Amino acid sequence: MFFVALAWLELNAPLLRAQMTGAPTAGYKLEPGITSSTMPRPLREIGFDQNLDQYVPLDVPFRDESGRTVRLADYFGSRPVVLVFAYYDCPMLCTQVINGLSTALNLLSLAPGKDFEIVTVSFNPRDTPATASAKKAVYLERYTRDGAARAWHFLSGDEPSIDRLTKAAGFRYVWDAETKQFAHPTGVIVLTADGRLSRYLFGIEYGPRDLRYALVEASAGSVGNAADTLLLYCYHYDPMTGRYGFVVMRAVRIAGAATVLALVSFIIVMVRKEKRAASLS
């Protein structure tokens, strides 16, 4: 029965993944006739370059929401960091990205400030501590967990600082003069405590499971529990989708090991019972 269930999960994994994360199912296609050459130029230039296992420059200076000069290193050192790129007067996508993140964060049992930090960096050099502070106030009304105010940081900076960080993180965006807006990709990045790019989660909705696994992996097991470590053996991060997928064969191995262990335990118990019965007779 267990193996039948595993087979069903594997066959329906794309549908389940779409329901949990908002990602399109396998086989999703653009409208007929749309090619990369007909796509608006700004959209052809944006995206994420996954610089996995590379380090971001922690010496980059920014200003926090109170106007204090900080360096990125101030938020690293002891726990994983969720990094979000967003500009604070963005009319649509940035808001949806942060909305999706705050929704996922509210469903996590992990504690902000204890298990992870959140750093939102504006890629608009015209943003100021005032706009950062206003944006932070909005999201602290959505994310009300203890420690959120101390653990979620909204930064602004000048163009050289923004360029250094976005290039290191592989975040490609452009200014669209026609719409007078930035064109940019959507997603969040999870980094290790020492500033290494660990996982990219794409889109505007993030499954709490994906975010939790990304934080557990970025912490090298110091965040989460033994169950997370076991489940991560059965789930694998796919850089193409920015999601964690179920790996059937790994689950089968665990099930097989558990079956063998149960069988050995049963044999030991029965042998001991027989010896006890023999000694009494």
Image: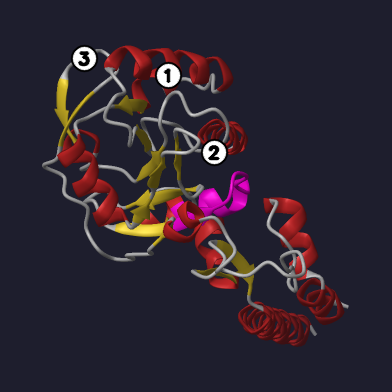
User: Separation of disc 2 and disc 3 at Cα?
Assistant: 24 Å
- Disc 1 packing (10 Å; few <14; some 14–19; many ≥20): some
Q: Which mark is residue 136?
A: 1
Q: At which x and y percent is residue 101? A: 54, 37
Farthest-out residue, front: 178
> Which residues fall within the magenta stretch?
200-214
Q: Height in image: 81 above or below 232?
A: above
Residue at 45 percent across and 13 percent down: it is: 137
User: Separation of disc 3 and disc 1 at Cα?
Assistant: 13 Å
Between discs 3 and 1, the one toward the N terminus: 3
Is residue 150 rendered to the left or right of residue 202? Answer: left
- Disc 2 packing (10 Å; few <14; some 14–19; many ≥20): many
Question: Dot 2 corresponds to which residue?
Answer: 97
Identify which residue, 106 or 169, lies in the foreground. Answer: 169
Query: Which corner quadrant holds the N terminus?
Result: bottom right
Residue at 78 percent across and 82 percent down: it is: 277
Q: Quadrant of residue 72?
A: top left
Between discs 1 and 2, the one toward the N terminus: 2
Q: Height in image: 21 above or below 246?
A: above
Question: Dot 3 corresponds to which residue?
Answer: 67
Asked whether residue 102 is drawn in magenta, I would say: no
Residue at 67 percent across and 86 percent down: it is: 260
Asked if the residue at tag 3 contacts the one at tag 2, i.e. Cβ–Cβ closer than 8 Å, the answer is no
Q: At label 1, which amino acid type do we have?
A: Lys
Q: Tag 3's secondary structure? A: loop
Identify which residue, 103 or 78, lies in the foreground. Answer: 103
Q: At which x and y percent is residue 261? A: 64, 81
Identify which residue, 118 or 266, lies in the foreground. Answer: 118
Q: At which x and y percent is residue 228? A: 53, 57
Q: Tag 1's secondary structure? A: helix
